[in-house]
Amino acid sequence: MKVMLVEDEGIAARRLQKLLEAEGLEVVVHCKSNQAIAEYLDQHPEPALYFMDIHLNDGIVFELLQKRALQSPIIFTTAYDQYAIKAFKQNSVDYLLKPIQEDELKKAIDKFKRLHQTTSAIDIQVLSQLIMTNQKPTVSFRDRISVKIGERIKSFPMTEITHLYSENKITFIHTSEGRSYPIDYALETIATELNPKKFFRINRGQLVAIDFIGDVITYSNSRLKIKIPLAENQDFIVARERVKDFKNWLG
């Protein structure tokens, strides 16, 4: 069965593609943005099934789905649970929260196969009821992170982390003490383990904690600049394509 993989994080995409191929699915295309999805579909027929992340390089995927009605079903894959109801209004089979578990992915694929065998036109109201009944995710997010300091290992609660950032291919945490420490995780990986209500990825290289945000200032090219106490020597710029989501996240 031919599927489209929509995911803008390289590590997450490679892992999901391996899981899909292990289930006997063929990933015919990997798209990282709404624009890439639209361009592919302009030239090719729809795949049998979509696996779609919600937050992409150029906005959330619902921006595309509002403009373009897709005929094939979608399994959403995301680190954010606040879009579940919105996803149900699309041609959605399931809604998987990152980090994606192999057994949950298999259940979602099996659900698609059962539905596909019984009907070619999926009833969205029926699907919504099925998902609401069967998919009640109990999400646990990382509450601590360990770092190596010389010969010692120290564990910091996430409530003391002001931000995380990537520099020279190394990921760092910055604490409320005003110090930075390298960690053994890629930024893409650790981002999937953090509470999205508390941490937001403002650009490709930085995640900020809502409890430590000071001023938010308008910046050039429709971007925003954030001030974080104890980190005055760093610039925190919200990428233009993430400004709308960032404002919604702030509340």
Image (cartoon, helix red, strand yellow):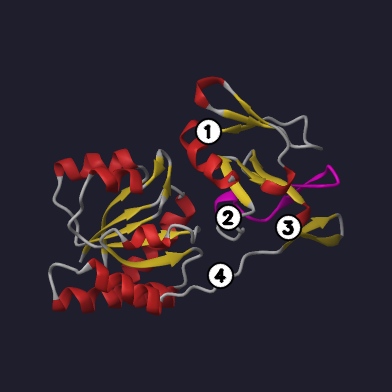
Instruction: Mark 1 and mark 3 in contact? Answer it, CB < 8 Å.
Output: no
First-in-chain label (1 vs 2):
2
Q: Indicate the secondary structure of the residue bearing disc 1.
A: loop
Secondary structure of the residue carrying numbered label 3: helix
Please check the rendered image and state whether residue 16 is part of the magenta-colored stretch, yes or no.
no
Q: Is residue 139 visible?
A: yes
Question: Badge 3 is on which residue?
Answer: 158
From the viewer's perspective, is residue 148 above or below residue 121? above
Residue 201 location (% of width, % of height):
57, 45
Query: In the rendered image, which residue does mark 1 sit on?
Result: 239
Three-letter residue code for mark 1: Ala
Task: Give whichever of discs 2 and 3 has the lower sequence position.
Answer: 3
In percent of width and height, residue 207 lies at 62, 45
Examine the rendering and report whether any part of residue 24 can be seen.
no
Q: Is residue 196 left or right of residue 28?
A: right
Judging depth in this view, the residue of 198 and 155 nearest the camera is 198
Q: Which residues are magenta?
A: 174-188
Mark with earlier residue (1, 3): 3
Specify the amino acid type for callout 4. Val
The front one of 248 and 143 is 248
Give the quarter of the image for residue 124.
bottom left
Residue 88 position in % (x across, y down): 33, 63
Observer-nearest of 149 and 102: 102
Q: CA distance from mark 1 to mark 2?
A: 17 Å
Q: Residues within 10 Å of mark 3 (few under 14, many from 20)?
A: many
Q: Earlier in the sequence, mark 1 or mark 4?
A: 4
* Rendering coords of residue 16 (x, y %): 40, 62
Identify residue for label 2: 196
Q: Which residue is mark 4?
A: 139
Q: Are marks 4 and 2 in contact (CB under 8 Å)?
A: no
